[in-house]
Image (cartoon, rainbow, N blue to C red):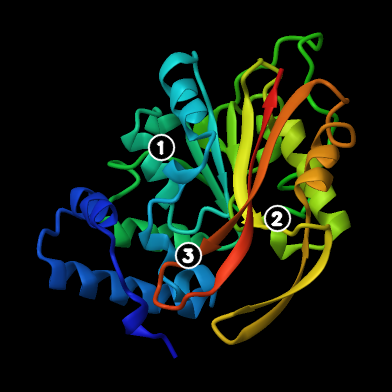
Amino acid sequence: PLNESLYNLRPQDAAFYKDLTGIEDDATLKQHILDVQAKAYKVAPYVCIYLFSFTRRRMSGLPAYQQVVRIGREHKNPIFLDVGCCFGNIIREVIIDGFPAARTIGTDLHQELWDLGHELFKSSPETFPARFVGGDAFDPEILAVAPPASLQTTEVSTPDLNNLTSLNSLRGCVSAIHATAFFHLFKEDQQLHMARAFASLLSAKPGSIILGAHAGAQQKGVVNQVYWGIEVDMFAHSVESWTSMWDGEVFEKGTVKVDAQLREVSEDVGGDERYPVLLWSVTRL
């Protein structure tokens, strides 16, 4: 069962939700968020929904976030892709910070979560023109592995974002890709597969970036982690293995700059457990 006592909005998160929903009263806002949470948890019983992680502004805490903001404001026709976008919170964060809304795309296994995002933030496809591509990122019809784009390849034609049904149409076009709490859901070979697939979408333009955060470790390997009494086995990379995967395996060595750091992070909701989290970015040179 869901645990209402885990609800704990920080002032900056309350301001974000009040601004977007128009609900000023704290109690009304809390009930609104609890209602949507209950519906979402029936669709997908994710830990991030259970722990109210979706109520926190997380993107702005990533060390490379300002690079994304800069791309949104300065590049011509930038494209932002959020992988595992759930309600579309992260996309709403980057839009507030100046990324053009019609140039943002979310992808998730569950279309219903995206639709519930409209309910959560009291938006509609008209007021919130971000695009959505539903489906399994391991389905090659949705996202296939291809070599990274290079500046030598012919000019990539800009895809029609209005009629997007597959991420493959975005090959070589995406300026910034965000994936948090995503890679650690998969085994080592699957993480490499996903990294290669993302790399094929990234624009070859210097400064284009892939960034995110997920469970990490001092030494790469399978780690057994207990989250709120639930035991989870997951494959975690170290700073060194994550860096060498991107710079050498995924991209040709020396063509990207990888910034990765391991931090002890708490879930902020009561408990004092701290988890090693890898915060990272991969930038085209």
Reading the image, the residue beneath label 3 is 112
x and y, in percent, of residue 202 in the image: 68, 29
The amino acid beneath tag 2 is Phe
Q: Is the residue marked by circle 3 packed among few (<14), some (14-19), or many (20+) residues within 10 Å?
A: some
Residue type at the position of mark 1? Val
Q: Which residue is mark 2?
A: 183
Asked whether, in this view, residue 208 is left or right of residue 163, the answer is right
Query: Quick one: quadrant of the N terminus?
Result: bottom left
Residue lying at the far bottom of the rendered structure: 1
Which residue is label 1 attached to? 94
Label 2 and label 3: CA atoms lie apart by 22 Å
* Mark 3 / mark 1, whichever is N-terminal: 1
At horizontal 58% and vertical 52% (from top left) the residue drawn is: 180
Q: Earlier in the sequence, mark 2 or mark 3?
A: 3
Q: Position of residue 155 (x, y in %)?
A: 71, 10
The C terminus lies in quadrant: top right
Residue type beneath disc 3: Glu
Is 156 positioned to the left or the right of 269 in the image? right
Instruction: Tell me the SS state at disc 2.
Output: helix
Residue 83 disc label? none
Residue lying at 68% horizontally and 41% vertically, measured from the top left: 260
Check disc 3 and report its element: helix, strand or loop.
helix
